[in-house]
Amino acid sequence: MFQKILIANRGEIALRIIRACRELGIKTVSVHSTVDENSPHVRFSDESVCIGPPESHLSYLQIPAIISAAEITGADAIHPGYGFLSENPHFAEICHSCKIKFIGPTSENIRILGNKAKAKEIMKAAGVPVIPGTEDQLDSPETAKKMAREIGYPVIIKSCFGGGGRGMRIVEKEEKIEAIFSSLQKEAFNSFGESNLYIEKYLQKPKHIEFQILADTEGNIIHLGERDCSIQRRHQKLIEETPAAQLSDSLRKKMGEAAIQATKAANYTSAGTVEFLVDSKGGFYFIEVNTRIQVEHPITELVTGIDLIKEQIKIAAGHKLLSGKDNFRFEGHSIECRINAEDPKKFIPCSGKITALNLPGGPGVRVDTAIYCDYTVLPYYDSLIAKLIVHGKDREEAIRKMDQALHEFQVEGIKTTIPFHRKVFKNKNFIKGEFHTDFVDSFLQH
């Protein structure tokens, strides 16, 4: 097992990793920007190193500074969390060349699966259902128009290296393709350093279902059930739950088998997530593999009793995967609300000082956060400030617990998305499980 892990991240996920390391008897090193000097992840780690000024590209994305921090402190592994460098194949390669273990999949895994078009080719060859679309990267707007005519409108054009809801546009008419193609290429290059695009049939009113995977270096693979991530705004997830409402046992079984099949086809190791869209007729289609721990991993932990961060660390250390379902069971229902420092009506980020704070509690209520009273939400980083997670014996109880927990969750001094979440949990369609990826847009219109 590792002796010391450097955490190349900040906020709640850095704290989450510190806790897992402590339970495994591993010392931790936090890196931080100048404005994060007094943040909880710095205070609660064993050591800390300042790696640059506030801006991410000058600190948390600075590979040389992070590697230097690991070498100076004698860290033998780096955990990237999610976001920042977690899906950067070059970073994984550098770690390997410096004999520092990257806690995650191989650089080759990240590179191949990070290319959405390439990942789709692999899945199609392995017999995993994929959405109709281009086999190769698009070389021009004319090629995009030709393909769109073949598969039928609406279509969605995506960056081959996109993620997090960025680098994609829905197109409903041919005359829009040329302008969208050009602007999307620029956006993709600015966001991901690559301008390659591909096109797919746009499924209307689908559900977004993902399966949590664990795969060790000996070829053992398990899935830990699905998460419904359909409640999203501009392709950014807002609420997740497990198990998925209105997913039949037979479809769940088929999708779980396909997720394992996809993992094997990619020779994947570590924790990962295989994501699908499910149409109104029960057809499901592969969309991507997330090669990192997900923001929403806690809900899977609550229904299975498995600490996913610990398992991720153990796999990286060469330990064999927990074998079979004798080691875990699916129990109850869990829901997560992402609490963002944003205007709840316009979803515009809101930075500032938290002047008063009350965190909810009680049986089956978990809050993953790094905020506290007098904490200043900074404009340099992601607007996620907390994850509110509940666990109940069934979906009905979990919804009631979340409603109460949201009522108790009080944040003053800044705007948050708590009012939005409270409205969702009063919505009849949500309560009945009758929602799709367009739920939030139609919900906000009313």
Image (spheres, rainbow, N blue to C red):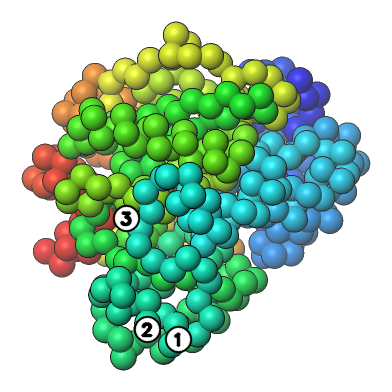
Q: Earlier in the sequence, mark 1 or mark 3?
A: 1
What secondary structure is found at the residue carrying circle 1? helix
Question: Do we see residue 369 in this rendering?
Answer: no
Q: Residues within 10 Å of mark 2 (few under 14, many from 20)?
A: some
- The residue at which mark 2 appears reads as 145
Horizontal arrangement in the rendering, residue 42 relative to residue 141 (left or right): right
Q: Where is residue 142 in the image (x, y as percent from the top left)?
A: 43, 87
Real-space CA distance between mark 2 and mark 1, rounded to the nearest whole angstrom: 6 Å
The residue singled out by tag 1 in the image is 141
Residue 107 location in percent, x, y?
71, 48
Q: Mark 3 points at which residue?
A: 232
Residue 148: tell me if it is visible.
Answer: yes
Q: Mark 3: which amino acid?
A: Gln
Disc 1 to disc 3, C-alpha distance: 29 Å
Direction left: furthest residue: 428
Residue positioned 17% across, 48% down in the render = 281
Query: How far apart are the two marked residues, 2 and 3, measured between alpha carbons?
Result: 28 Å
Residue 118 vs 191, above or below: the answer is: above
**Helix, strand, or loop for circle 2?**
helix
